[in-house]
Amino acid sequence: MSRALVAGMLITAALTATAQAQAPAPPPFATTKVEGTENVYIFRFGGHQSMFIVTPQGVIATDPIGLRRPAAKAYIEEIQKVTKAPIKYVIYSHSHFDHIAGGKPFKDAGAVFVAHRNAKARIDALKAPDVVSPDQVVDGKRNITLGGTTLELNYVGKNHSDSTLVMRLPKEKIIFTVDWIPLQGVQFRGMADNYLPDIEDGLKKVIAMDWEKLIPGHPGPGGRQTGTKDDARAYSVKLTDEGWRVLKAADPLAKRVDDKILAAQGPSAEVAAQAS
Ligand SMILES: [Zn+2]
């Protein structure tokens, strides 16, 4: 073996080792306080994340993200590291089970579950055993006020589902909305269950709202956990040109995310198939 080849191999090995050292596997879950706030947090488990807000009177949590994994237990323990105040609410971002399954520990702790009316209808029709049915529904708009914090729940029309809420903290200028405004590029994984003609209108409404930080349901490239209005604008531009055509072309092939998940769950899939 030539000296140059050995040297090359050593360099390659060193570069590989460096790359691995620079990118350690992230821990299975983590909680991050949103920069510039005193009381807004992101709980991430695997590739899913949700927002929770701590107030002196209790906690407003969002998606349990606990489909076939113990995320809700970890989520509650993480909240309790921040506050001993009770968890008063769990708000569902939309109807897809990869975000909303596993909420029972929150229910057992006394939380009130809130979702868009269409999400409740779908959840109740599918009767998935590990999805808590919402106690209360939202149609167009509702404010949740707790301990001096207001959380606006806005419905801006069909997009990635027909039940997506845009949750907005007016004082903190933060929105949490899931699976339809990606942090980079066109979100091919989120095309399932899309309602294409309505997305642009919804995006315009969201961009017109007063906010500075977007928390999506999945971190972006490099683990980026929040975005800005520029991300929403960039997505909006993409929707008007090439990306929009791609989305339109692909949509007839799209399958509902939660149906696929149910199918993977076994016996309950038959119930779901009959119900949907
Ligand atoms: Zn979804």
Image (cartoon, rainbow, N blue to C red):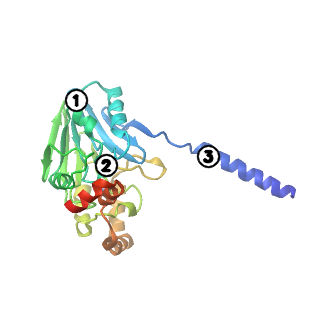
Report which residue position mark 3 lands on. 20
Looking at the picture, tell me which residue is in the foreground, 54 or 104. Answer: 104
Quadrant where the C terminus lies? Answer: bottom left
Q: CA distance from mark 1 to mark 2?
A: 22 Å
Q: CA distance from mark 2 to mark 3?
A: 30 Å
Quadrant in the rendering for residue 109: top left
User: Percent x, y for residue 219?
Assistant: 41, 49
User: Looking at the rendered structure, which numbered label has been put on residue 99?
Assistant: 2
* Amino acid type, label 2: His
Looking at the picture, tell me which residue is in the foreground, 69 or 220. Answer: 69
Report which residue position mark 1 lands on. 58
User: Looking at the rendered structure, which numbered label has been put on residue 196?
Assistant: none
Q: Are marks 3 and 1 in contact (CB under 8 Å)?
A: no
Quadrant where the N terminus lies? Answer: bottom right
User: Percent x, y for residue 101?
Assistant: 29, 46
**Element class at badge 1:** strand
Mark 1: few, some, or many residues within 10 Å (few <14, many ≥20)?
Answer: some
Would residue 126 be found to the left or right of residue 226 on screen? left
